[in-house]
Amino acid sequence: MPTPTPPTGHVITVCFTPGVDADWFAASEKVHDLLHINGTPIRRYRVRHRPLIGWLTRFFGYWLLDAARRCGAVTLAAGGRKSRLDLTGTAARAAHDAALRWRAWNTHVGATTKPARPFEDFLAQHHIAPSTVTLYEARRRFELQPRVLAMLAHTFDPYELSLYQAGEATYAGLHWRIALIGDALITTDGRLLTPATDSVADRFRFLNEACAYLRALRSNARLCAIATA
C-alpha cells in the first residue's frame, strides 16, 4: 500500500543527521524530492536558553534556522540543532492554548448542546452510496446538527468535533503533538512518515511514532519545519 502524501498547505518536519548540511534549502529540497511540492521554512519552535549561560546565548542565533528576535533576544526558529530548540516549551505552549480553546468550547457549546455525530460518519455514508448521499448532502446533514451549528456560531472548527467531544486531555494531546511534528515527518534516512488515513486515530498513531522518533534523535541532530505551498 503506497504511503499517502500530504496535500499542500501543510507543515512537514525534516530531520538531519549530525554533521550534514541542514539549511532550509536542503530541507525544502528533501520535501520536493519526496513529495514534488515546494515549501518554505516556518517558525514553529521556541528557542531553548540554558540556565546561567542563557543570558548570553539568547542573543546569538548559532545552530538555528530562520531565527526570529524579540527585543534583541532569539525567541523562535524554523529549526536548528535539537539541543537549541525548546521542544518541551513548544509542546507546553501548544497544549496550554489548546486547553483554553477546549474550555471555551465546553462553556459555550459542550454544556449547552447535545453530543453530535462527527463528519466522518456522514462521509462514510457518502462513500457507501455516493449517488444517494453526495458529498454536499453529507456536509449538509452534518452541519444541520445543533452542536455543529453552535460551533460555527462561536467560530470553533466543526471538523474537530470528535476531538472536542473526546475531552480536554485528548484535544490538547493532539495539538501539542502537531506543534512538534506538523502533518508529516521526513527521517534522517529519507523515509516519509504520514498518517495512514485522515482519521483522528491514525493521526494519533502517526504523531506518537513521529514524537518517539524525534525523542530518540541525538541532541546534535537538526530539524527544520517546512510549510508546503
Image: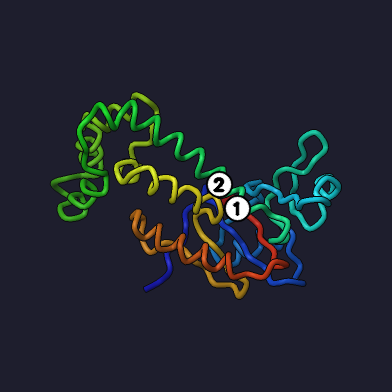
Which residue, given by chain and number where applicable, does mark 1 sit on? 88
Q: Amino acid at mark 2?
A: Ala
Q: Which x, y percent locates residue 123?
A: 24, 49
The residue under the point 25% across, 31% down is: 147
For the residues bearing labels 1 and 2, Cβ distance under 8 angstroms: yes
Residues 125 and 20: in front is 20
Residue 122, disc: none
Q: Please, is residue 117 above or below residue 108 in the view?
A: below
Left or right, 24 with respect to 54, comes to left
The residue under the point 80% across, 33% down is: 71
Q: Amino acid at mark 1?
A: Thr
- Please tell me in which quadrant of the rendered image residue 76 appears: top right
- The secondary element bearing badge 1 is classed as helix
Which residue, given by chain and number where applicable, does mark 2 sit on? 92
The residue under the point 77% across, 51% down is: 51
Q: Crowdedness of circle 1 by 10 Å Cα count: few (<14), some, many (20+)? A: some
Query: What colour-coding does the image apply?
Result: rainbow
The residue under the point 68% across, 50% down is: 78
- The secondary element bearing badge 2 is classed as helix
Report, in whole angstroms, how far the alpha carbon at label 1 lies from the one at label 2: 6 Å
